[in-house]
Image (cartoon, rainbow, N blue to C red):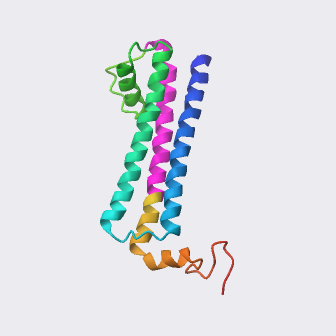
């Protein structure tokens, strides 16, 4: 049991690091979008940018589930990568079909993976929501966004929050 908890903790750390890098990239793109004044008033441009983020975060989730699958193979819980990957995707997404199951000696590890998947999908959901807020601001309030880019906000404060009035 302790071995599974320790291994699960290491995998959670690995998936958090992967997710953190992906989040940093998304933040970097959002900052560029803001500071460079990207024209997102077009529905197609804003949709494309949002869809790109969603697809990228989907790829991150697939990679994270693959890390778990490779671990299942490495510890001998599965003989092949395909059934391990399928099982991992089902557990990571908390779908839980139950058509492929682990030996009871590894079930704690799979429960930890499910908890990790919930956390990563929650994080991804928050990131997409945050990103969408920025896109919507650019689409529906472009003048306000341009004012912020030049250091003047509508509430008479600059970027550091100092009162300009």
From the viewer's perspective, is residue 106 above or below residue 60? above
- The image shows residue 37 at horizontal and vertical percentages of 47, 71
Looking at the rendering, the stretch of residues picked out in magenta corresponds to 103-130
Q: Quadrant of the N terminus?
A: top right
- Please name the residue shown 51% across and 21% down the image: 108
Residue occupying the far front of the picture = 36
**From the viewer's perspective, is residue 9 above or below residue 147?**
above
Asked if residue 38 is positioned above or below residue 3 in the image, the reply reads below
Image quadrant containing the C terminus: bottom right
Position of 51 with respect to 110 (left or right) is left
Give me the residue at 39% from left, 25% from top.
Answer: 85
Query: Which residue is rendered at x = 34% and y = 22% of the image?
Result: 98
Choose top left, top right, bottom left or bottom right for residue 99. Answer: top left
Q: Quadrant of residue 2?
A: top right
Extreme-right residue of the structure: 162
The residue depicted at 40 percent of the width and 33 percent of the height is 94
Q: Position of residue 161 (x, y in %)?
A: 66, 74
Quick check: is 111 in the magenta stretch? yes
- The secondary structure making up most of the magenta span is helix
Residue 124 image point, x, y percent: 46, 47
Decide which of 103, 24 is in the foreground and name it: 24
Is residue 124 one of those drawn in magenta? yes
Total numbered labels placed on residues in the image:
0
- Position of 106 with respect to 62 (left or right) is right
């Amino acid at each position: 049991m302790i071995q599974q908890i320790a291994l699960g903790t290491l995998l959670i750390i690995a998936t958090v690091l992967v997710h953190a890098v992906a989040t940093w990239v998304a933040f970097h793109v959002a900052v560029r979008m803001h500071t460079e004044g990207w024209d997102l008033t077009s529905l197609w441009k804003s949709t494309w940018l949002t869809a790109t983020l969603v697809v990228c975060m989907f790829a991150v989730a697939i990679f994270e589930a693959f890390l778990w699958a490779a671990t299942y193979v490495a510890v001998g819980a599965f003989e092949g990568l395909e059934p391990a990957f399928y099982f991992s995707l089902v557990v990571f997404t908390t779908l839980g079909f139950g058509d492929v199951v682990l030996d009871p000696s590894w079930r704690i590890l799979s429960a930890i993976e499910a908890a990790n998947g919930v956390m990563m999908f929650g994080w991804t959901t928050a990131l997409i929501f945050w990103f969408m807020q920025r896109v919507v601001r650019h689409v529906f309030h472009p003048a306000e966004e341009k004012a912020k880019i030049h250091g003047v906000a509508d509430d008479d404060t600059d970027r550091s929050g100092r009162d300009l009035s």
